Amino acid sequence: MSIDWVHFTPFTALAGGLLIGTAAALLLVLDGRIAGISGIVGGLLRPRRGELAWRLAFVAGLAVAAPLYRWFAVMPEPQLDAPTPLLLLAGLLVGLGTRYGSGCTSGHGVCGLSRRSPRSFAATLAFMAAGFATVYLLRHLLPR
């Protein structure tokens, strides 16, 4: 295994992680909310009184982040190595997994682990193991 030093960006990754952690901590400390994306977006589908504004603001921040980043850095050229139907199926399976797991990677992996939640620890182990197994299967065991 070798490192692609041209595209290795530890400081950008560190800055992104710090921003995500800070935003999740602030949402929890200031408003008592968990920054789990599936829960926030799911709450938009069936909004409760007084919860629509902050959820819309959070999702709008996600949508605006990439265009703002483009002002400060060059965006990488997207490269999709899978056909669209397979990507749609993958998205549906991720959505199904977030329902069965009672949350997504951001809710369990970022917020749940930082709160030492046993349920989030189990969920994070499960989706990381599934991801590792999928990559190993697709890259090393199945013929191309």
Image (tube, grey):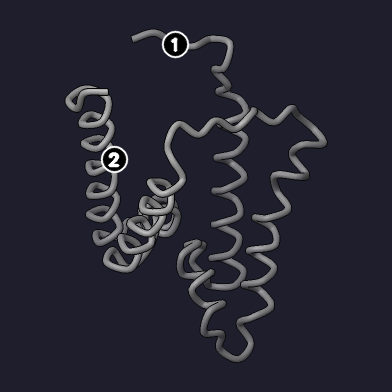
Where does the N terminus fall, quadrant-wise? top left
- Across and down, in percent, residue 126 comes to 22, 49
Q: Is residue 89 left or right of residue 106?
A: left
Disc 1 element = loop
Disc 2 element = helix
Q: Residue furthest bottom?
A: 49
- Taking 9 as reference, is 86 above or below it? below
**Which amino acid, by three-letter code, is at mark 2?**
Gly
Residue at the spot x=59%, y=50% of the render? 22
Label 2 sits on residue? 131
Near-viewer residue (116 or 46): 46
Q: How many C-alpha atoms fall within 10 Å of the one at disc 1: few (<14), some, or many (≥20)?
A: few
Residue at the spot x=42%, y=59% of the render? 107
- Taking 69 as reference, is 6 above or below it? above
Label 1 sits on residue? 3
- Taking 140 as reference, is 14 above or below it? below
- Across and down, in percent, residue 108 comes to 37, 57
- Across and down, in percent, residue 105 comes to 40, 53
For marks 2 and 1, give the CA distance: 21 Å
Residue at the spot x=48%, y=73% of the render? 42
Quadrant of residue 138 within the rendered picture:
top left
- Across and down, in percent, residue 7 comes to 57, 17
Near-viewer residue (69 or 90): 90
Number of numbered tags placed on the structure image: 2
Residue at the spot x=62%, y=68% of the render? 30
Marks 2 and 1 close (CB-CB < 8 Å): no
Q: Is residue 129 left or right of residue 16?
A: left
The first of marks 2 and 1 along the sequence is 1
Q: How many C-alpha atoms fall within 10 Å of the one at disc 2: few (<14), some, or many (≥20)?
A: few
Where does the C terminus fall, quadrant-wise? top left
Quadrant of residue 141 within the rendered picture:
top left
Quadrant of residue 102 within the rendered picture:
bottom left
